Image: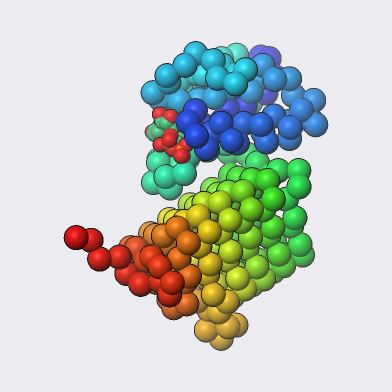
Amino acid sequence: MNGNFYGVYGASGFGREVMPVVRDQLSAQGVPRDRIVFIDDNPSHLKLNGHDVLTFDQFLKFDAECRYVSLAIANSSIREKLAARCSAAEIILFDVIAANVVRMDDAVIDSGAILAPFVTITSNVRIGKNFHANIYSYVAHDCLIGDFVTFAPAVRCNGNVVIEDHAYIGTGAILKQGRPDKPLVIGRGAVIGMGAVVTKDVPPGVTVVGNPARPLIKD
Ligand code: UDP
């Protein structure tokens, strides 16, 4: 056996953004660059930005004591599927937290999160598994966020907001602050469009757009 081996699952846009953060985080722990690879089920390169690109099977075959993976794919259903695949193969989903992330008091985040550069998580926050907060997003006080929730860049999630599992919050969206006795609720699997200003609860599975955000009516 030959030490630990680390994979960034997804060798596309988000994966290429996550890799440098992973490399910085792991190099501070003394992990050499060649122990960190991309994993992709449909690889278009053998090497990308200085890292090998392996299929999942190749990743499993590589001689290692322990395998760790970060699921760097924005689609939350794919993340859930790959989390189950990793768990079945006894792979640990590790947290990726950029060096300049701000985390305040009592911010509890479950396993497998990716907090990109310039993210802030303020105080008394609960976040579920495999959360993605892309660059410049924030989560303010007393928010409760479920599993497999995805924030695109620059999401402004104000205090006392509840976000259920698999919701997707688009770039630059603003979620209005709720109240302790009546949080703003974004339902399971809801999609918040780019730049939307969300002032009311969004039911499960509904897509909203605009300011103030309203359900998207498809032509
Ligand atoms: N992918 C994968 N296994 C899957 C689904 C997707 O390896 O089961 C890979 C896919 O081949 C692609 C990447 O994940 O390289 C997803 O890239 P995409 O541009 O769709 O998403 P993003 O990088 O924005 O999350």
Task: Indicate the position of residue 139 as horizontal and vertical percent values.
Answer: 62, 63
Decide which of 187, 219 is in the foreground and name it.
219
Q: Is residue 58 above or below residue 175?
A: above
* Residue occupying the point 62% across, 73% down: 159
Considering only vertical position in the picture, is 206 above or below 128?
Answer: below
In the displayed structure, does residue 19 sit left or right of residue 167? right
Name the side, left or right, on which 41 lies relative to 20: left
Q: Is residue 67 visible?
A: no
Residue 104 seen from this side: yes
Residue 146 position in % (x across, y down): 51, 60
x 37%, y 66%: residue:
208
Q: Residue at x 43, y 47 (%)?
A: 76
* Residue under the image location 68 percent in, 46 percent down: 117
Ligand 1, seen in the image, is in the quarter at top left
Using the image as rendered, state which of residue 130 and residue 47 is in the foreground: 47
Q: Tell me the quarter of the image containing the N terminus.
A: top right
Outermost left residue? 219
Tell me the quarter of the image containing the C terminus.
Answer: bottom left
| Relative image position of residue 29 (x, y in whole percent) | 79, 30
Locate residue 147, reporting x and y percent. 50, 55
Colour basis: rainbow
